[in-house]
Image: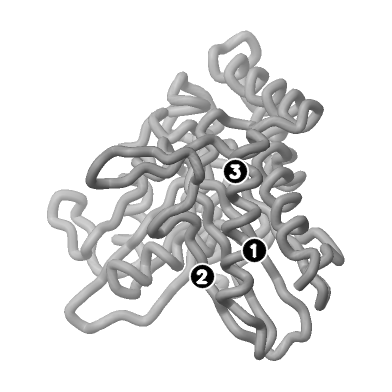
Amino acid sequence: MKHLKDSLLELIRRTSAELPDDVHQAILRGLRVEEKNTIGEDALKIIRRNIEMAKAKSQPICQDTGSVLFFVKTPLGLDQPEFQQSARAAVLAATRKGYLRQNSVDSLTGKNDGTNLGPGTPAFHFTQTHAGETDVRLILKGGGCENVGAQYSLPNEKLQANRDLNGCRKAILDAVLQAQGKGCGPGVLGVCIGGDRATGYLESKEQLLRSMADHNPNKEIDRLERDIVETANRLGIGPMGFGGKTTLLGCKIGVLNRLPASFFVSISYMCWAYRRQGVVLGKKGRIKRWLY
């Protein structure tokens, strides 16, 4: 794919510097409901200004440009190793241009070679489809919000959470309560009910690819998503933990089958700098359209 590297480089630049409109609008809605002349309102005003400046200057919206996570739906026959090679080249170029911070560290030695390349960096998740186009979605997930992710095994005696949707609700809200302002709120939750420890966390991150305005096709889960946001926003945690009415911007929940012996609830927290973007590519790798 002749133009693939350049297309992926532009995807990285735009993801790093420009907040998707659906997320931007959710933050502005939060600003409108905050009480005037409060620290929570001031925090959201600073966030609004940050968003505007990053886009105008084409600079990272946050100094922690985060983990680089590619989610790729490919047509049958696409050369995945070639795609990975082009993506790594794009990540290296993006790092040298300053779209990405030098952010990948050897876990054993602590060495940072400044390339953002290494085992697990960037991360790739491929799915083959019968579609004739390549769908590439990118999440840049900062360390602060990643640190407050959580996984619960139900039943949980401390929370009095059983293996039912009410137990899941208690676990999700406890994760919000424990995060407080440490996840750079207001945040968005990606949640998976079920799966194993690994697939649950992956599914919770994939939920973050959904649009802010969509509705879960499962009506019971859709009600739970809305209830989590409404309840969290009554906790008083507010933007950056300073207090206020905007603790969560959204909650997206997926469900996977599980083993009878296990019942996991996996929660990925995404900060207000909700950097996710996507493109559809043509056969030569040119960008045909943007997805958010």
Going 23% across and 46% down the picture, which residue do you hit?
108
How packed is label 3: few (under 14 Cα within 10 Å), some, or many (20 or more)? many
Secondary structure at numbered mark 2: strand
Task: Give the percent coordinates (x, y) of residue 35.
Answer: 61, 18
In the rendered image, the vertical position of residue 52 relative to residue 230, given as above or below: above
Residue plotted at (50% across, 37% down): 102
Report the Cα–Cα distance between label 3 and label 2: 19 Å
**Badge nearest the viewer, 3 or 2:** 2
Measured in 3D between alpha carbons, the distance from the residue under mark 2 to the one under mark 1, in whole angstroms, is: 15 Å
Q: Residue at x 52, y 24 (%)?
A: 244
Residue in the picture at 50% in, 56% down: 122
Q: Secondary structure at mark 1?
A: helix
- Name the residue that disc number 2 marks: 125
- Give the mark, 3 or 2, whose residue is nearer the N terminus: 2
User: Which mark's residue is nearer the viewer, 2 or 1?
Assistant: 1
Above/below status of 43 relative to 206: above
Q: Which residue is mark 1?
A: 86
Q: Amino acid at mark 3?
A: Tyr
Quadrant in the rendering for residue 143: top left
Count of labels in the image: 3
